[in-house]
Every structure is written in structure tokens, then in C-alpha cells.
Image (spheres, rainbow, N blue to C red):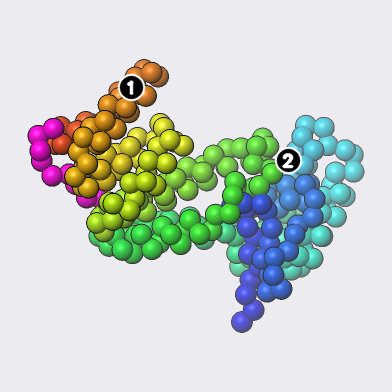
Amino acid sequence: MVAKPMIRILGPIDVVTPDGVQSVGGHRPRAVLGALVVAAGRAVGIDHLAEVVWGEDPPATAANTLQSYVSDLRHVLGREAIRTIDHSYELDLDVVDIDVLDFQRTLRLADIAADDPSERWRLCGEALGYWRGRPFGDLSDEPAFTLESYRLDELRMAAVELGLEADLALGHHELVVGELQSAVEEYPYRERLWLLLVTALALDDRRVEALRVCSRLRRILGDVGLEIGDEIAAIERRILDGSPASGDGTG
């Protein structure tokens, strides 16, 4: 059975075929393919594709030019990969795979594997393995892809956090402290990461450091008019009382 081509948008847009990684051409053909991926099997009208590619002032030849781009994409993906429906184009998900769909499917499996931290950890690693860079590559900041890029980045961070929670549940608190310290520097307003860091430090008998982290988070959030959440406040109280910390990052 011949493997289906894999469209990859979790990084620079390209296609993996049995012959290897194939480029998709220039900026505009990549934008067309990106828009078809965002629709994920739903038909995308030619007018919308024209707006994605040229903005609010497409040329009079837009429809013909789009037809040429789609023809080039079919050459890479296979003739049946993109269907023409009225004045629209649609990816046939029975003919192609898409990395973002596989990522989301794997993340859902990780999310429901709450009773098996080893399996959750494995699935999170598998899900994050689909990522190669910013979603849509150089198209990430374009208006047609900004919201989807943000959504996917949030899902990536959810996978990171689930994987780190699984690490703690497996007793790997010593190993994840450094990773969590780097993560809170990069994402200072993701309170879940701070909770995991405090939990990991407490489990590693570094309770003074854990309390300092709580104080630092309180200052960071206070600077923007926020307060620490109930879960971190609860684990802070347990540390002060000398009670054991939870190993799953849930307080």
C-alpha cells in the first residue's frame, strides 16, 4: 500500500511523499495550500482564496492564476488530492494526510490517558514530534493565518504541559525542574507552568526555592493587576505547613 502524501504546516509548509520532502513552490501557492489545510476538508471558495493570496484587491486574472496554483499542487499531491466543487477547491482527506490533524488526534489521546502517565508522556512526545517550527512558516503572521497559528501554538503548549505533568506523575521531578525554569521565563503568564515548577521543586525537597517561585509569580502577576490562582495558593500553603506536595501538578 502506497503511503499517502503528508501535508505539513507545523513549521514551513511542505509535502512529504514516498519520494521525500517536496517543496510547494513560492509564497502564493503555499498560501493556497495553507488555506485549504485550515479548512481541513471543507470547500474553500475561489473568492476567499483570492483574498488570502492577494488581499482585498486581487487581479482580474485571480481565478485563472489560482487554477494554475492548484494544478501545481496536484502535481505534488496527486491529481485526486484537491477536488473542484463549483467555484471552490477542497482537500480530499482520504487521499492526503495533514500533520496538524495527526497532532490534534494524538493530543486528544494524551488528554484522556489520565490514568496512565507513562502512556500520556509517550503520546505527548509523539504529538510534539510533529512540530518543526512556527505554524505555516513564513505565512504565520499573515492575516489569513494569524488566528489559526495562535490556536495551534496554544495546543502545542497544552501538549508541553501535559507531558510535564506526566513526568511529575512518573517521579521525574528532578529532571524537569530545569525545563520548567526555562519555560516560565519564556511564558511568564502561563500559570500552569509555574504550578508545575513549584510542584517539582517541592517534590525535590527544595521548598525554600518553591516558596520563592510563588513570591516571584505573585509579583509578576501583581504588575498586571492579577493574583495567583487557587491551585498555586493551595500548594504554597501546604509547603508552608510542611505537607507533602502532589506529584501530578494538579495541586
Residue 89, position in %: x, y?
72, 54
Question: What amino acid type is highlighted by mark number 2?
Answer: Val
Q: Quadrant of the N terminus?
A: bottom right
Question: What amino acid type is highlighted by mark number 1?
Answer: Arg
Q: Is residue 16 placed above or below 8 in the rendered structure?
A: below
Residue 192, position in %: x, y?
34, 39
In this view, the residue farthest toward the right is: 61
Q: Main secondary structure of the magenta part?
A: loop
Please state the extent of the stretch shown in magenta in the rendering.
240-248
| Res. 42 visible in picture | no
Residue at 41% across, 57% down? 124
Q: Is residue 126 placed above or below 227 in the rendered structure?
A: below
| Res. 182 visible in picture | yes
Label 2 sits on residue: 52
Label 1 sits on residue: 219
Residue at 75% across, 59% down? 23
Closer to us: 115 or 68? 115
Residue 187, position in %: x, y?
44, 36
Q: Secondary structure at mark 2?
A: helix
Q: Secondary structure at mark 1?
A: helix
In this view, the residue farthest toward the bottom is: 1
Left or right of 103? Residue 143 is right
Closer to us: 167 or 231? 167
Residue 33, position in %: x, y?
71, 53
